[in-house]
Image (tube, rainbow, N blue to C red):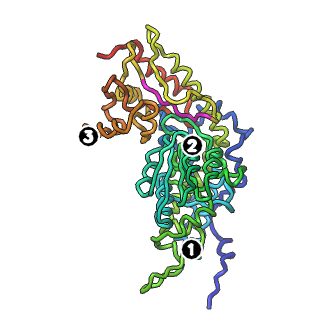
């Protein structure tokens, strides 16, 4: 009989562990690096050589990875032998360590307690939402679904499997509706921490407290994908009722690389919501009978929900990218401080763009609280108007941006609540236009003519850790080309 000592196996692993406890807190100031802005030109030259002839202003889509992320990932992969983690061999234990440290990266990003939350790796935030909804569908016969008008499309889709659904603008309307009749079935309430359309931010802990006051049947889902690009939410120093049950995020929007997301799940909620999970696969069960329906599920949430073998090399890249990002920028507090300054500066300069007759070139959407990290993120949504006040199609702006090597985003941003609130688009109009033409995000169907001409979407610019004031200067120069023109 051969006895294998796991402790001995672990001691010989040729894996350079990343000690996350030595990293500076991601959500607090780091005095040593809080003024990385004076070094930004050097950082851009050494870490982002591909930006030499580009002005990148689409960090809400995904931020950019520094060269050191790739270099550290190559060093980790070339210096480690990684096996399938479902074993006790040395190579398998290397992978087991990497998986756990990748979870620690997410805990560190969100300042979350591993005793309270579990981390489940998914493809992206949308996949995390889908996983939660599948849990509700499998476990409960019926459930209600409530979502914010500011939601990305991925938060609207779950209504298709709910018994009833409601879209809210005022969160108190949800409380008032359920105060008339206490919910008899579970309710999943979701919202976004930051609008991916305008960049407006919402009071997450207050929302959570409000929704939890309705009933113990209410579960909460925070979409932190947009918010986390510069200010990941902290899940630690809050009361239990102020903390969301589920948080989804796309890690590539935060670090640029690798392409992976996470569902961060409160264990008390997840153990109940996923208790009825039907489908299982390799890695999610301990024992399976062949001729009866018996299957013994794993105990830990992530072991139940992460089906098959995790992308261990991708998770190794996540560890390296996180380490590289913090070594460059110190903390996300520093990044937040930088992008707040950049956003406020861009807004101020854009606001000064006025035609010769005094008509403003730029119209902004959402609350103009740029630079206040509590109220607004590093996103500006806008459209252009000619000197007679007529709309300039966003496709013309996109073409000008392409000509000037400026990368930005135009269209609906997968946020139809944004269109409804800020451009006045109604549900009936969405349906009518769908019968006439295929409206695609970013196409040239950018002006609609009903009672009067209006935009069908917006131009969106968004900023990241490596955005410079020179980028803003290039943007302003490009937009200035539209001054004092009247379109035929």
Q: Quadrant of residue 374?
A: top right
Q: Position of residue 446 (x, y in %)?
A: 34, 30
Q: Is residue 198 above or below residue 216?
A: above
Under circle 2, the secondary element is helix
In this image, 209 relative to 143: left or right? Answer: right
Query: Which residue is nearer to you in this view: 159 or 6?
Result: 159
3D distance between C-alphas at marks 3 and 2 = 33 Å
Query: Which residue is nearer to you in this view: 29 or 450?
Result: 450
Q: Quadrant of residue 117?
A: bottom right
Query: Which residue is nearer to you in this view: 272 or 225?
Result: 272
Q: Which residues are magenta?
A: 375-383
Q: Earlier in the sequence, mark 1 or mark 2?
A: 2
Q: Which mark is residue 263?
A: none
Residue drawn 34% across the image and 14% down it: 486
Q: Which residue is mark 3?
A: 435
Under circle 1, the secondary element is loop
Question: Which residue, as the protein is rendered here, is positioned at the far left?
Answer: 436
Question: Which residue, as the protein is rendered here, is positioned at the far front?
Answer: 180
Residue 421 is a magenta residue: no
- Residue 208 visible in image: yes
3D distance between C-alphas at marks 1 and 2 = 37 Å
Q: Which residue is mark 1?
A: 298
Q: Which residue is mark 2?
A: 171
Tell me whether the residue at label 3 lies in contact with that at label 2, contact meaning CB atoms closer than 8 angstroms. Answer: no
Quadrant the N terminus occupies: bottom right
């Amino acid at each position: 009989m051969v006895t294998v000592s796991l402790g001995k196996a672990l001691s010989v692993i040729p894996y350079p562990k990343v000690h996350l406890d030595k990293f500076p807190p991601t959500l607090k100031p780091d005095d040593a690096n809080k003024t990385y802005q004076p070094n930004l030109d050097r950082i851009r030259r050494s870490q982002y050589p591909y930006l030499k002839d580009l002005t990148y202003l689409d960090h809400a889509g995904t931020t950019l990875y520094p060269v050191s992320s790739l270099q550290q990932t190559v060093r980790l992969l070339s210096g480690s032998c990684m096996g399938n983690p479902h074993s006790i061999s040395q190579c398998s234990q290397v992978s087991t360590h990497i998986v756990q440290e990748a979870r620690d990266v997410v805990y560190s990003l969100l300042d979350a307690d591993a005793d309270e939350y579990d981390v489940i790796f998914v493809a992206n935030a949308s996949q995390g939402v889908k996983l939660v909804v599948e849990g509700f569908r499998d476990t409960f016969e019926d459930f209600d679904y409530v979502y914010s008008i500011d939601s990305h499309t991925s938060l609207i889709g779950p209504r298709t499997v709910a018994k009833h659904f409601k879209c809210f603008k005022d969160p108190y309307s949800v409380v008032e509706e359920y105060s008339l009749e206490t919910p008899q079935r579970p309710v999943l309430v979701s919202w976004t921490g930051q609008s991916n359309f305008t960049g407006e931010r919402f009071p997450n802990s207050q929302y959570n407290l409000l929704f939890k006051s309705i009933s113990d049947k209410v579960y909460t889902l925070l979409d932190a994908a947009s918010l986390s690009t510069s200010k990941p939410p902290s899940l630690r120093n809050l009361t239990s009722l102020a903390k969301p049950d589920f948080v989804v995020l796309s890690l590539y929007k935060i670090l640029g690389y690798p392409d992976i997301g996470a569902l961060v799940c409160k264990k008390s909620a997840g153990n109940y919501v996923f208790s009825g999970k039907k489908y299982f696969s390799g890695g999610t069960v301990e024992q399976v009978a062949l001729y009866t329906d018996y299957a013994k599920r794993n105990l830990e949430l992530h072991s139940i929900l992460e089906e098959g073998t995790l992308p261990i090399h991708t998770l190794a890249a996540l560890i390296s990218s996180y380490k590289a990002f913090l070594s460059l920028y110190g903390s996300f507090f520093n990044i937040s401080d930088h992008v707040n300054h950049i956003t406020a500066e861009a807004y101020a300069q854009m606001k000064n763009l006025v035609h010769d007759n005094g008509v403003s070139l730029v119209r902004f959407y959402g609350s103009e609280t740029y630079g206040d990290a509590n109220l607004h993120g590093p996103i500006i949504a806008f459209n252009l108007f000619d000197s007679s006040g007529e709309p300039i199609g966003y496709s013309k702006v996109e073409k000008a941006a392409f000509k000037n090597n400026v990368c930005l985003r135009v269209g609906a941003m997968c946020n139809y609540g944004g269109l409804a609130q800020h451009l006045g688009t109604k549900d009936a109009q969405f349906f009518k236009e769908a019968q006439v033409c295929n409206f695609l995000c970013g196409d040239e169907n950018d002006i609609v003519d009903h009672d009067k001409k209006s935009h069908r979407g917006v131009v969106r610019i968004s900023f990241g850790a490596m955005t410079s004031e020179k980028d803003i200067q290039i943007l302003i120069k490009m937009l200035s080309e539209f001054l004092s023109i009247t379109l035929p």
